[in-house]
Structures are given as structure tokens and as C-alpha cells.
Image (cartoon, grey):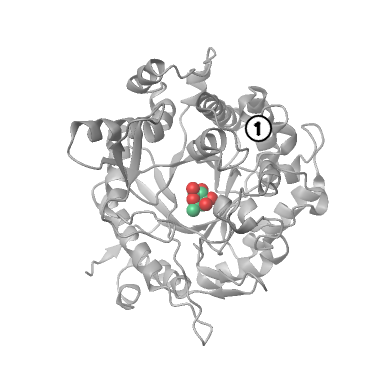
Amino acid sequence: MKMYCRFKEDFQWGVATAAYQIEGACREDGKGENIWDRFCHIPGNIAGGADADIACDFYHKYKEDIKTVHELGIPCFRFSIGWARIYPEGPDKINEKGLDFYEQMIRELERYQIKPVITLYHWDMPQWLQDIGGWLNRESIRYFTEFCETMIRRFDGRVDKWITLNEPWVCAFNGYYWGDFAPGLKDFSAALKAAHHMLCAHGSVVRRFREKRYQGEIGIVLNLCPKDPASESKADKEAASIDDGFSNRWFLDPLFKGNYPEDMVSWYAGQQVVMPEICEGDMELISQPVDFLGINYYYVEFAKKCGGRWPLYFDTTTKDYPVTAYGWAIVEEGLTRLLLRLHEEYGAPRLFVTENGASFLDKVEEDGKINDDNRIDYLRRHIRACYQAAQQGVRLEGYYIWTLLDDFEWSTGYQNRFGLIHVDRDTLRRTVKKSGHWYGKVIRENGLTGEADDMF
Ligand code: FCB
């Protein structure tokens, strides 16, 4: 199906990455240990026994990679700062060499007039902070604010957008409840507490940003998706609403309405979950206005009531939808629906899709090419879904693909390839995939208007 989609003149196209997933150089230039370094080296934690000690070696190859971003014509580059490069041993001493790396990298972006969009926390907390409780320790709010200010002060005026946190839900629940992500804890109430402190830390950074009148914009990135019932049964409908409360509203409501959702507060109380301590002023701190909301969108989940799983009692399925190599259901209309909902229920904030993409088992052809038509199809469907939301009045201002390079995908190691650029795991050689060239065309045409849509 063809559809003519031309976005607004100033629509921002970009690509998203994260420090730990690409940089490598895990012991270089004074970098300290972080929770993912620790977690990766515990046998059984990462598929294939992989680690990110070298990852894509972006730390040494950033010039080559940024040049490719430029050649593809991608105007915005989202990346994160490795906190343990800046504060390797504790909160008192800054590692200048860590700052230097980001200085050099940003200069390289400036050289090509690529806009930096910086995530301040993409999950790699320094181990020294984890040793005193990590996000369970309220002091983390203060340490995070200091770290962020160090970065913001240093690069003030050169950065278009600052993102405080990436996906606090994943960080809290995978990290502190399911335990499949660092730091690997398994305690539901602890996850809620970690999430509360993250939200406060976000608010504290926004407050500091406003007080000091730093330049640019500041916002947060949430992973959000529609939670649909797996069937029309009453039980599945209730499961979907709990899943939505647990994963979407638990973050959206405090940020945009200044309170945790009532239905979930009483659900948790009924399950003897310990609520985090909410200190005076916390909810005001959390709900300070942001300049934009970033959305990471990958799939829709279908909730099914199930018996024995305290405290939420649901499972999720993909129904009959086609799935990516990660097993995530491909449902592009879910993105349109999500964007409309945010617009209608959360006060029409300015929105950016800060991550969207798909992992597939790419095949390198004999001529060395990677013809990833399935990824192009996924991206095209989702770009159209964005367009449809924008047509209906949603203030959607940009779209970023996850991700530039085939990278370290957390506990799945290197199995999931999301990149527009293929990375050979033995040689680390880069090859731009067909999707990379295709995305360049989309950007040139500012949408799906002709050639980019004709490629299929
Ligand atoms: C998101 C993360 C990102 C990446 C993608 C696939 O949850 O923000 O780092 O791993 O998923």
C-alpha cells in the first residue's frame, strides 16, 4: 500500500544509540566500573556469555561512525553519557579524560552540523553508587543531579535536547524485579522504590536546569505501548488495565498529573506491595513541566489473566501478529493510537519518537550486501503511523530509529541486530544495510513521498 507522507518542514529525523551498548573501552582513560560491567561478568546473565568490554568499539571508531551518519544525511544523533567515565570512583572526583571523550565526539558532530541529543542516564550506573544501594538510596537523586549538571554546564549551548532518563520502567522492573538486567535484584517493592527515586531524580535535574537557565530543552524518555486484552473476557480486560497502570500510567501520571494512578495504588495495597515513601514535595518535583516527552515504541502487548503470578496476575502474548527476531509483535497502528492517547489524555505535550526499530536475522549476501527488506517494511509502516497521528493534530516533532550499529543488546548480547549498519562481530567492520540507505532517502524527501516508497 502506498501513501504520500510528507512531514512538516522542521520535523527532526534522527538515529538513537546508548553509551554502554556501543562504546566498549570499558577500562580505558580512567573509566570506573558500572553495574553492567559487573552484571555481564556473572556467568549466565548474558546470552552467549557475551559482554560489552569492546562492544562496537565506538570509543575508538566514533569518527568513522559519525562520518557515516553524515553521509547518510541523518541530521540528529541521540547518544548517552557513561556516568562511570565521568565519576569513576565516587561523587567527588571528576575524570577529565571522560569529559574529553564526549568533547571530541560532540566536536565531530558539530563538524558535520549534526545535532546532539544527549541522554544522561541509559542504565549504566557507576558501581560505587550501586554499592550504597543504587536507586534504592535516596541520595542517588543528589548524585545524579550533580552528574547531570556537570555535563549540562560543560556543554551548555551546544546541545539541542537533554534527556534525563531513558525508560525508567525497564530500569526499575528489569533491574530490580525480574533481575534480568543490572543490577539483577528480584524484589517488586524495591522496583517501585527505585522508580520513585528515578522520577524524583528526573524532576531534580529539570528544576536545576530551569534555575540555572541552561540553554536548550529538557525532557524524559519513556517506553510506552498499548496494552490490549488478549480476549474479550472480563478477566483479560482487567489484566490489560492493570498492565497499562503498571507500565504506562505509573510513569505518565506522576509526570503529567502529579500523582500515582489511584487504581494501581489500591491494587498494590491489596497485594501487600510496599509503596515507596513519598516525601513532601516529591510529586511537585516529579511533575514539573518538561519541554518534550520522548517515546520509545516497539510493539503492542496483549494481556491475559493468569493465576499464580503475584502481584500483577497477568501474562502477555503477541496474538497472531508477525513478530521480529526479538519476538515483539509488529503492530504499527498501536503507535498511532498511543500518540493520540498521549495527546488527548496528557495535555498535548510536544512528542518525539526517540526510539523505534526492529531486530531481524540479517543475512550478508555473497556480494557483502545486507538487503534487510523486512526492517525497511517495519520502519516504513511505523513512519506512516507517525504521519497519521500528526495528521490528526498530535504535536509529533521528530522520529529516531533504534539504532545506528548492530550493538550490545543487554541480556540478549549480540543476538538482536537492530542497526542500520551491520557490524561484523569478529572484525567489527561496518557495512551500511539497505535500510540505512533507504532511511537517507526518507530524510531527503522528508517522508515517504516518492523514491523512498518506490523502492519496493
Ligand atoms: C530499548 C532500550 C534500548 C534498546 C532497545 C531495543 O528498551 O532503550 O537501549 O535496547 O530497547
- In the figure, 400 relative to 315: above or below? below
- Image x and y of residue 193, in percent: 54, 24
Question: Which image quarter: residue 10?
Answer: bottom left
- Image x and y of residue 222, in percent: 45, 40
- Identify the image quadrant of the N terminus: bottom left
Using the image as rendered, state which of residue 287 and residue 432 is in the foreground.
432
- Identify the image quadrant of the C terminus: bottom left
Secondary structure beneath label 1: helix
User: Is ligand 1 closer than 8 angstroms to the Cβ of mark 1?
Assistant: no
Q: Is residue 408 left or right of residue 72?
A: right
- Image x and y of residue 90, in percent: 78, 33
Given the current orientation, which residue lies at the most extreme left position? 232
Given the current orientation, which residue lies at the most extreme front position? 308
Given the current orientation, which residue lies at the most extreme top position? 280
Q: Amino acid at mark 1?
A: Phe
Q: Is residue 272 left or right of residue 277?
A: left
- Image x and y of residue 306, in percent: 32, 34
Number of marks = 1
- In the figure, 259 relative to 429: above or below? above
Using the image as rendered, state which of residue 232 and residue 135 is in the foreground.
232
Q: Which residue carries the number 1 mark?
A: 144
Q: Residue at x 44, y 57 (%)?
A: 326
Q: Crowding at label 1, few (<14), some or many (≥20) Cα neighbours within 10 Å?
A: many
Q: Residue at x 54, y 69 (%)?
A: 421
